Amino acid sequence: MTTEDFGAPGHPADTDRPHSPAQPDRPAAPRALWTRPWAPGLAGLVVGAAAVGATWLTLADGDDAGGSGVGRTSTSTVTLPAAVGAFVEFQGAAHRSGNRGADQTARRIATSDAQSTSLLSRAYGGAGAAVRTYAQPADLSVTFMVGVVRGGSPAPFVPYQDAAALGLVRPMREVRTVGGVACVLVNQPTPAGQTPRPDSVTVDHCQRTKEGLTVTVGNISGDLHNSPDQVAALVEDVWSDVT
């Protein structure tokens, strides 16, 4: 839902840096977007793909986290806030960081967000929409994407897994509801009888929806991706601002 001074999670590590042996029982923590030296060139691709890929395909409809289809849409303009919780627009955070290549990266993200906004609107038949990337203002150690569209969406779905039959505490993928927000989670395998580590859960995205509106937070980097409750709270912040 990228090269130079800017990085995105999910890509290979720098080739001149030694690799550590794989740790099958501990997921590698995604690195913040800014911490890798090879990312501005791919930033648009990563951000744009996340906006119209898995995140948008699993948005919800109806009342809050449940629903049954897109339903009624509106072409009313969507205006996203300059800040969501403690996070600010990526462009402002990048400029403040003083990092080399900040201006170029900020322009790329702005272009990607604009293109993703158009794609999201098109996916909902021309409904009003907005996509924006936010970041931790101090050091860009956390980034995430907010998408809002004036249309409801299908409820999130993941295939059923019988965790007990697999000898696990939790299924490897699940939908967890936090208040009115539904979060799609990826769980690292924890054998039955053990306690899952806090970092064993990764948030794919969280969303809230009703007829005529869907708010999603996804494409998350940094420690935030291990906290469904915090991501759900960001969804609620945006929801309150745009409704």
Image (cartoon, helix red, strand yellow):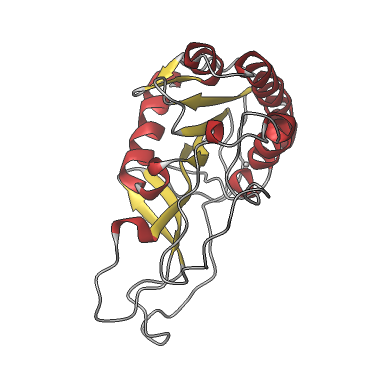
Tell me where residue 72 appears, x and y as whole percent: 60, 33
Relative vertical location of residue 92 with respect to residue 174 in this rendering, above or below: above
> Looking at the figure, which quarter contains the N terminus?
top right
> Looking at the figure, which quarter contains the C terminus?
top left
Left or right of 74 in this view: 96:
left
Q: Is residue 197 visible?
A: yes
Left or right of 176 in this view: 123:
right
6 or 228: nearer the viewer = 6
Q: Residue at x 52, y 68 (%)?
A: 22
108 or 20: nearer the viewer = 20
Q: Residue furthest bottom?
A: 165
Image-quadrant location for residue 242: top left
143 or 211: nearer the viewer = 143
Relative vertical location of residue 151 with respect to residue 240 in this rendering, above or below: below
Q: Residue at x 67, y 46 (%)?
A: 53
Left or right of 211 in this view: 10:
right
Q: Residue at x 68, y 17 (%)?
A: 104
Image-quadrant location for residue 150: top right
Relative vertical location of residue 7 with respect to residue 138 in this rendering, above or below: below
Tell me where residue 44 appears, x and y as whole percent: 71, 31
Q: Is residue 125 visible?
A: no
Tell me where residue 39 appears, x and y as whole percent: 67, 34
Left or right of 227 in this view: 107:
right
